Image: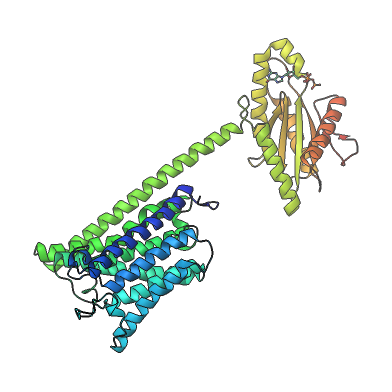
Amino acid sequence: MIAVPFHQNAGAVRGFVLFSRFAAVVVGASALVVLAGWCWQLPLLTTLAHGPHAMTPNAALAFVLSGAALLAQGLAPVRWHAGTWLSLAVMGIGLATLGEHLWSVDAGIDHLFDDPASRAPRARMAVPVAIALALLGALGLLVSLQRCLYLREIIALVLLAIVVTGLASYAVALAGSISGPFEQVPLQTLLMLLLMVLGWLSSTPATGLTRVATADTFGGALARRLLLPSLLLPVLFLFVFEVSQSLLGLPETLALALVALSSGGAVAGLVWWVASLLDKLERQRMESALLRNDAGTDALTGLANRRAFDDALASLLRGQRERDAVFSLLMLDLDRFKTFNDDFGHLAGDQVLRVTGKLLRTAVRPSDVAARYGGEEFALLLPDTDAAAAGEAAARILRAFRAFAWPQRAVTVSIGVAQATVGDSATDLIERADAALYEAKRAGRDRAAMATSVSAASAVVAP
Ligand SMILES: Nc1nc2c(ncn2[C@@H]2O[C@H](COP(=O)(O)OP(=O)(O)OP(=O)(O)O)[C@@H](O)[C@H]2O)c(=O)[nH]1
């Protein structure tokens, strides 16, 4: 069972870990076949992939060890496990060969699988392979030890650069002839290296560079789809360049124009692809925002519903605790609404509630929260508003109700006003505003009352 950290895409994390095991098995098994080829002198097995050179036995041994180290990495949670030692051995093989190249000595590392009777010529891996294996061992070592994250990522990037340059040389070779430092590097070595580097990076999907590629975000989705193709694009461009020159016989300027055209096309394709992904994402975001709005809206009045009001109140109380932010609450109740319903019917009553929604929305600022609290009761949350300013807002609402041309008969409203005080809970504040509303009703309706303190009776504002 693979533990998936928060914000990481579970499928991607599992996929990366499985890929790392797959890479370990494929590389380890292929390198074993090459070793078998050397042991039983079967040249066909030593050159698995097309190329002028066979993989040397000590390079194959290093890949077997590295594959085993990568497999052990997934199985052992401790730092110093078999994988750590195996990675050290891989590094040792690379460094020893490098030493032989540098000081022109024969330390015996090239004769590990020689048949003593046949006096076979030495099979020394090329310098780029020795460097790459030393780095591969170091990469495995650092991943196993869970140390030096940045150094680890730098080593992985250097290795990828070596592999891509080598593959690019092969792209040139496919179209013409290979030359330069990668002349003696077998293609299978490059492919095994690529698999191993990606395998080591994938074995810890929640850290370093791979963390972005497994993130459960748009960036993660993008990285998963684009990183590998962008690594291989230079190989493709070089191939196009060489084919157009050596196979098609095009002049260099035309070949360059072809490469420019294909790279422009590739970039345009990528931009289009990213744009279409962004477009899809934006539409999904808008749809879910609409759904969220529906869930927080009262169907009859279009105001915020009770749930949205509770959320807004909780957030304002948090702001008050954290930043000492001032805000006020108005509780409103339509006067004698039962009689209105009885006299003119529920449908006319519903129409009054709709108009009330419109009047409240126009009477307050866009940043205020106007909600239907329940039945014919409404609530207004006024951020950055003290009791005096909230009293003015209440007076404005009363005037708007009086000024409206109600079709059946005049409809009035009573309002309780309370400013939030430090230490208030939602219930405290609502109870104070309700008590003030009760005072307004008791004093004759069509008026507002202020809650003067936490416990004291409300001061009635004259209509
Ligand atoms: N038409 C309609 N009426 C509603 C709705 N929700 C609640 N009511 C009515 O609102 C009325 C509220 O009546 P009461 O709570 O007695 O208060 P009131 O008649 O307004 O009297 P005071 O509040 O004391 O001024 C009830 O008759 C409810 O049926 C609604 O969605 N539509």
Quadrant of the rendered structure where residue 223 is?
Answer: bottom left
Q: Is residue 364 visible?
A: no
Quarter residue 383 falls in: top right
User: Is residue 109 toward the left or the right of residue 414 in the image?
Assistant: left
Above or below 28: residue 455: above
Q: Is residue 389 left or right of residue 163?
A: right
Q: Is residue 280 left or right of residue 397?
A: left
The vertical placement of 56 against 367, above or below, is below
Looking at the picture, does residue 288 appear above or below residue 61? above
Q: Horizontal placement of 36 versus 359: left or right? A: left
Q: Quadrant of ligand 1?
A: top right
> x, y percentage for residue 17?
44, 55
Depth order, front residue of 356/48: 48
Check the image and tell me how it is coloured.
rainbow
Q: How many labels sit on residues? A: 0
Image quadrant where residue 376 sits: top right
Given residues 42 and 277, the one toward you in this image is 42
Q: Position of residue 417 (x, y in %)?
A: 80, 36
Residue in the image at 37% along x and 60% along y: 24
